C-alpha cells in the first residue's frame, strides 16, 4: 500500500497547489439562490448545504488536492447532518481528493480506539471488515498523552491512513496552554512536537515525511519556523490563512527547501468567495462556484510565489 502522506504529497505536486479546501456546512454561508429551492426544515437545510458543498467541490477538485470536512458543522444538524457528512466524504473520495476529517478526537485508549475505528480503521460487520466514515486523515487532540494517540497510530499503520496532531493551533487563546513552559524551560507545544516525532517515526514515506504529522497555525509565524526545524519529518496542516489573518509570506516558513512540508487550509475565504470584496462585483450570486474557483487559483498562485521565494 502507498504511504498516505506520499499520496497527499503526490496530489499536491500533481495540482501544483498546497491548499486544502475546508468545508463547514454553515447554513448562513449558503447563497439565497440555493436556499430558496428547499423547505427551511432540517432536511431542507441539509439538502441546500449538500447542493452548495458539492458545487464547490465540482468547481475545485481538479485544482485543489484535498478537502477538510469539519465535523462540528455537520453534527450540529443531528442525524441529518451526520448523513450529510458521510455523503460529502464519499462524494469527495469519488472526485479522488484526499479527504481529511477535522474531528480533533482524543480520549483514553479504549475510547480513542473507537474513534479511530470510525474514521480510520474498520469494524467487523457480518464477518467482514468495513470502513465507516473511512477518510484518509483525521485530526487528533494529544492532551491526554500517548495512550490516547496510540490507537490512531496503529490504525495508520494497519490501514494506510494518516493523522494530524494538534501542536500549535491558530486560535487567539492557544498560548494559554500551548505556550506554557515546563520546568526545563521548554514550551508545551515543543514537548508535543517531540512526541509527534516519536509517534510518527515508523510511518515515514519516500518524501521523508510521516503519516503522523502536525497541525501548526499560520497565525504564529515564529513558532511555525521553529517547528519546521524541530519536526523535519512532519507535514504541517496549516490553518489560519485568509479570514484568520495568516499571510502567505509567513506560511512559507513552514515549508522546506523543496517547496514541500505543508498544506494550507482555507474555509471561509473559499466557500464565501462570492461575498468577498475581491469577487462580489465580478460574479453574480448564482455563480458562487466560479467565484470559489477564482479565489482558489488566486490563493494557489499567492502561496506558490511566497514558497518559491
Image (cartoon, helix red, strand yellow):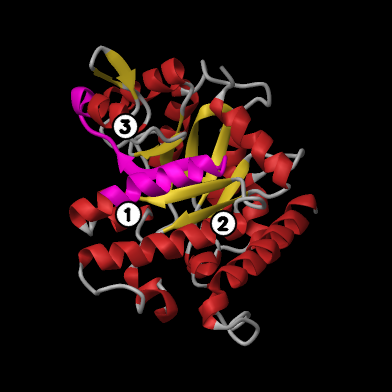
Q: Nearer the viewer, mark 1 or mark 2?
A: 2
Sort mark 3 into few (<14), some (14-19) or many (20+) by Cα contacts within 10 Å: some
Residue 124 lies, with reference to residue 46, above or below; the image says: above
Residue 245 lies, with reference to residue 127, above or below; the image says: below
Q: Where is mark 1, residue-wise?
A: 176
Q: Nearer the viewer, mark 3 or mark 2?
A: 2
User: Is any atom of residue 17 visible in this view?
Assistant: yes
Q: Which numbered disc covers residue 58?
A: 2
Q: Where is mark 3, residue-wise?
A: 132
Image x and y of residue 183, in percent: 34, 35
Image x and y of residue 63, in percent: 67, 52
Q: Closest to the observer: 38 or 280?
A: 38
Say which label, 3 or 1, has the lower sequence index: 3
- Residue at left offset 31%, top offset 29%: 116
Question: Residue 293 is drawn in which quadrant?
Answer: bottom right
Mark 3 → mark 1, Cα distance in angstroms: 36 Å
- Regarding mark 2 in the picture, which secondary structure is present there? helix
- Point out the image quarter for the N terminus: top right
The part of the chain drawn in magenta is: 83-111
Image x and y of residue 133, in percent: 34, 36
| Left or right: 102, with 1 as reference point | left
- Residue at left offset 62%, top offset 46%: 254
Q: Closest to the observer: 119 or 35?
A: 35
Q: Are marks 3 and 1 in contact (CB under 8 Å)?
A: no
Amino acid at each position: 500500500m502507498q504511504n498516505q502522506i506520499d499520496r497527499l504529497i503526490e496530489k499536491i505536486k500533481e495540482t501544483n497547489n498546497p491548499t486544502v479546501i475546508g468545508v463547514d456546512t454553515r447554513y448562513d454561508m449558503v447563497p439565497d439562490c440555493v436556499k430558496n429551492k428547499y423547505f427551511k426544515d432540517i432536511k431542507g437545510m441539509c439538502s441546500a448545504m449538500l447542493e452548495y458543498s458539492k458545487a464547490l467541490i465540482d468547481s475545485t477538485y481538479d485544482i485543489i488536492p484535498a478537502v477538510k470536512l469539519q465535523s462540528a458543522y455537520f453534527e450540529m444538524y443531528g442525524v441529518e447532518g451526520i448523513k450529510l457528512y458521510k455523503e460529502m466524504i464519499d462524494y469527495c473520495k469519488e472526485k479522488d481528493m484526499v479527504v481529511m476529517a477535522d474531528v480533533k478526537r482524543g480520549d483514553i485508549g479504549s475510547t480513542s480506539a473507537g474513534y479511530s475505528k470510525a474514521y480510520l480503521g474498520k469494524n467487523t460487520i457480518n464477518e467482514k471488515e468495513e470502513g465507516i466514515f473511512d477518510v484518509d486523515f483525521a485530526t487528533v487532540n494529544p492532551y491526554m498523552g500517548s495512550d490516547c494517540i496510540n490507537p490512531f497510530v496503529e490504525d495508520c499503520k494497519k490501514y494506510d491512513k494518516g493523522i494530524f496532531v494538534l501542536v500549535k493551533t491558530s486560535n487567539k487563546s492557544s498560548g494559554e496552554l500551548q505556550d506554557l513552559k515546563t520546568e526545563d524551560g521548554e514550551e508545551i507545544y515543543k514537548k508535543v512536537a517531540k512526541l509527534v516525532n516519536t509517534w510518527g517515526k515508523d510511518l515515514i514515506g519516500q518524501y521523508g515525511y510521516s503519516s503522523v504529522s502536525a497541525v501548526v497555525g499560520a497565525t504564529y509565524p515564529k513558532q511555525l519556523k521553529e517547528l519546521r526545524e524541530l519536526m523535519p519529518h512532519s507535514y504541517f496542516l496549516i490553518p489560519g490563512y485568509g479570514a484568520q489573518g495568516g499571510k502567505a509570506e509567513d506560511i512559507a516558513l513552514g515549508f522546506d527547501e523543496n517547496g514541500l512540508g505543508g498544506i494550507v487550509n482555507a474555509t471561509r475565504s473559499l466557500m464565501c468567495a462570492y461575498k468577498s470584496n475581491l469577487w462580489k462585483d465580478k460574479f453574480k450570486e448564482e455563480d458562487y462556484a466560479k467565484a470559489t474557483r477564482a479565489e482558489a487559483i488566486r490563493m494557489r498562485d499567492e502561496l506558490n510565489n511566497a514558497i518559491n521565494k
